[in-house]
Amino acid sequence: MSEIKVLVHDVFGTVVDWRGAVTADGEALGGRLGISGVDWQEFADQWRGLYAPSMNKVRTGELPWTNLDALHRMALDQLLDKFGVAGKLSEEDKVWFNLTWHRLKPWPDSVPGLTRIKTKYIIATLSNGTVRLLTDMAKHCGLPWDTVLASDIPKAYKPDAAMYQSAIELLGSGDPGAVMMTAAHNNDLVAASKHGMKTAYINRPYEKGEKQDRDFKAEHDFTYVATSFEDLATQLSC
Amino acid sequence: MSEIKVLVHDVFGTVVDWRGAVTADGEALGGRLGISGVDWQEFADQWRGLYAPSMNKVRTGELPWTNLDALHRMALDQLLDKFGVAGKLSEEDKVWFNLTWHRLKPWPDSVPGLTRIKTKYIIATLSNGTVRLLTDMAKHCGLPWDTVLASDIPKAYKPDAAMYQSAIELLGSGDPGAVMMTAAHNNDLVAASKHGMKTAYINRPYEKGEKQDRDFKAEHDFTYVATSFEDLATQLSC
């Protein structure tokens, strides 16, 4: 059995709280532009809700390769129309709001836990974001990645095999057992394990607030199950 | 004219002193195995001398895609034979020595200069090494990269266009003028500028010791010309 050398991490929901940050940026924008009557948490939830269907259009070939910034923008334009506020935002406002996904903030345990894990392991992202999004986010909130792996490297979205294989090849020197995927989502870890990677489940039962309808606990036999990155660091003796 | 947002860096010779580190590891290995009569600095120079010809075999299609670890190993085996010491090294010794390229050490100005530059810009590698080699090296010697771009992402070696384009796409959001290449090698910067990137020459006239035969100074009209990363940080007001 290979020794773990590298931990690659799902980011949205696992490392960072997308819901709080997108809602806060929406409220700030609404306040600045005098927009009333929009529930920005609902807006954030619907924006995130369009994420999986929009990636699936790329995964099934309905859309050619389209990066996550462009998918987020298509969804944003659709929702601004739906909420009846498209005419109140300038193009500059829309660009700024779309970049909210580059400015997400970590859960409280993420930076201290990952900083401990980094002392013994290579730590990287393995996210459906872009390299630039993940790099901007890390600089913005102090995430201590050794490097960033992202969907625009293999031009594929998880759970496509090309994403997990990119981590195994680029950081694992071809040995899947040397690489552990961490995520708060059972399906991501099940996919990683199919490629021979080790798995660590981080429990985030409040990622989607009261609307959460899955991923309340580890549903499979993962290598590690943790309540936080601090807990995972302790289990890894970091 | 686009504002520079990202600096990508050549690594071997520009950021790290490959010659000193490879020579020191050779001397340590020779001492441990009781090998006498090998000039390890000459060995290091010949190993590095096989670098461009071996990459050219990939660039011309004589070899299929082969990563730099594998090219280094082919050259190592060839040189151990040539120096008459192949039989004195175990496979484990050869694996260890081949990984000398993952353990190179920075020039004295690199970490302090890059740390200053990182406060205002995204900093990344753009190197013919692998993602894992560059990640290992950064952890080994404290290089503060925001992320690592490497030849095994586009599966191409500089000066192929695919390498420069990978930096423009993955970190520059498609805008070449937002990305500046830094290197101690005129030809790397000339290639980058052909793709619309900005350029910074870092003078390393002693990279190859007394055997240096080129790159004593900037030979073209680069965006910046600096004596060190500390000097470049000062010119960039970091």
Image: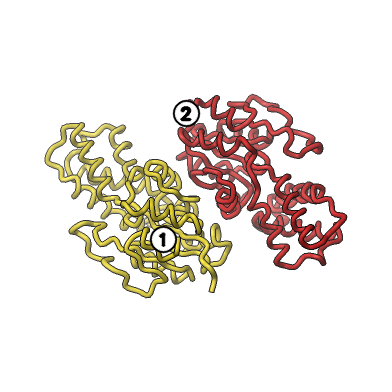
Chain colours: A yellow, B red
Q: Amino acid at mark 1?
A: Ala
Residue found 20% across the figure and 40% down from its top = A27
The numbered dot on residue A233 is 1
Q: Residue A97 vs residue A165: left or right? A: left
The numbered dot on residue B93 is none
* Element carrying mark 2: loop
Disc 1 with disc 2 on a shared chain: no
- Residue B23 image point, x, y percent: 75, 49
Q: Amino acid at mark 2?
A: Ser
User: Where B70 sits versus B8, above or below?
Assistant: below
Residue found 44% across the figure and 55% down from its top = A116
User: Where A117 sits versus B210, above or below?
Assistant: below
Residue found 85% across the figure and 57% down from its top = B36
Dot 1 surroundings within 10 Å: few (below 14), some, or many (20 or more)?
A: many
- Residue B45 image point, x, y percent: 78, 46
From the viewer's perspective, is the residue at label 1 or at label 2 nearer?
Answer: 1
User: Where A102 sits versus A176, above or below?
Assistant: above
- Residue B206 image point, x, y percent: 74, 35
- Residue A33 image point, x, y percent: 19, 32
**Which chain letter matches label 2?**
B
Mark 2 — residue? B2
Residue found 81% across the figure and 36% down from its top = B210
* Element carrying mark 1: helix
